[in-house]
Image (cartoon, rainbow, N blue to C red):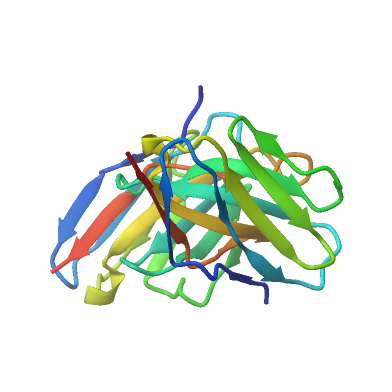
Amino acid sequence: AQTVTQSQPEMSVQEAETVTLSCTYDTSESNYYLFWYKQPPSRQMILVIRQEAYKQQNATENRFSVNFQKAAKSFSLKISDSQLGDTAMYFCAFLNDYKLSFGAGTTVTVRA
Amino acid sequence: EPEVTQTPSHQVTQMGQEVILRCVPISNHLYFYWYRQILGQKVEFLVSFYNNEISEKSEIFDDQFSVERPDGSNFTLKIRSTKLEDSAMYFCASSLDRGLDDTQYFGPGTRLTVL
């Protein structure tokens, strides 16, 4: 079974600054997909970014980018120019056998 | 932009009652999923559904749970006899396929409260 570990329960960042969320996972698969989802206080799950394991290039989506280290099984999320609307719980997720396995989440608070 | 919708947003029920949670996946998607999130805990996979049958289910998805696609648009999760521990947020998700684009898009969730 795949496990996803997010070691930072909470992170706080000043508006306009950068914050990096860590995620590690365990798998014996060679081809897979990784995701970051955002869950604001409304509790809706919103896709932030996706990374295919076969791609060496790190995915970027506007202010969000990942650092994907396949050998280390690491998949961190960087939020640049943080905005108040980025305040949310962020979940790292691994897609295996067409089902997502989620980490425990990291609560990000952006301070004005 | 197409999105997954879920109704109701909040359901309160008495223990032992049946509940049906409804989802309308993105219209051209073929694969459908239910997940749940007990307050303060991880999001957990319940079941996946394709071509009118269950593809995979977790150990959580026992005989009290069932899913169906009663028409061309709705996808439902039924809990036959609710228990206190069923109180959670239930998320529906859909994906286009399982190869080229299997990104799962989530609905806003249904908060189920069992009293």
Q: Is residue B98 visible?
A: no
Residue B108: percent from left, percent from top: 37, 42
Please give the name of the residue rendered at 22% of the width and 49% of the height, measured from the top-left corner.
B10
Please state which of residues B28 and B85 is positioned toward the viewer in this rendering.
B85
Q: Is residue A76 left or right of residue A103?
A: right
Q: Is residue A12 visible?
A: yes
Would you place residue B97 above or below residue A102 in this image?
A: above
Please state which of residues A87 and B78 is positioned toward the viewer in this rendering.
A87
Residue A57: percent from left, percent from top: 83, 42
Would you place residue A64 above or below residue B11 in this image?
A: above
Residue B37: percent from left, percent from top: 39, 63
**In the rendered image, which quarter is residue B13 located in?**
bottom left
Q: Is residue B104 left or right of residue B34?
A: right
Q: Is residue B33 left or right of residue A12?
A: right
Where does the C terminus of chain B fall, quadrant-wise? bottom left
Please state which of residues A99 and B27 is positioned toward the viewer in this rendering.
A99
Callout count = 0
Q: Is residue A66 left or right of residue B33?
A: right
Would you place residue A94 above or below residue A83 in this image?
A: below
Please state which of residues B10 and B24 is positioned toward the viewer in this rendering.
B10
Please give the name of the residue rendered at 42% of the width and 35% of the height, measured from the top-left corner.
A83
**In the rendered image, which quarter is residue A59 located in?**
top right
Please give the name of the residue rendered at 86% of the width and 63% of the height, measured from the top-left corner.
A30
Residue A67: percent from left, percent from top: 72, 51
Would you place residue B56 above or below residue B53 in this image?
A: below
**In the rendered image, which quarter is residue A50 located in?**
top right
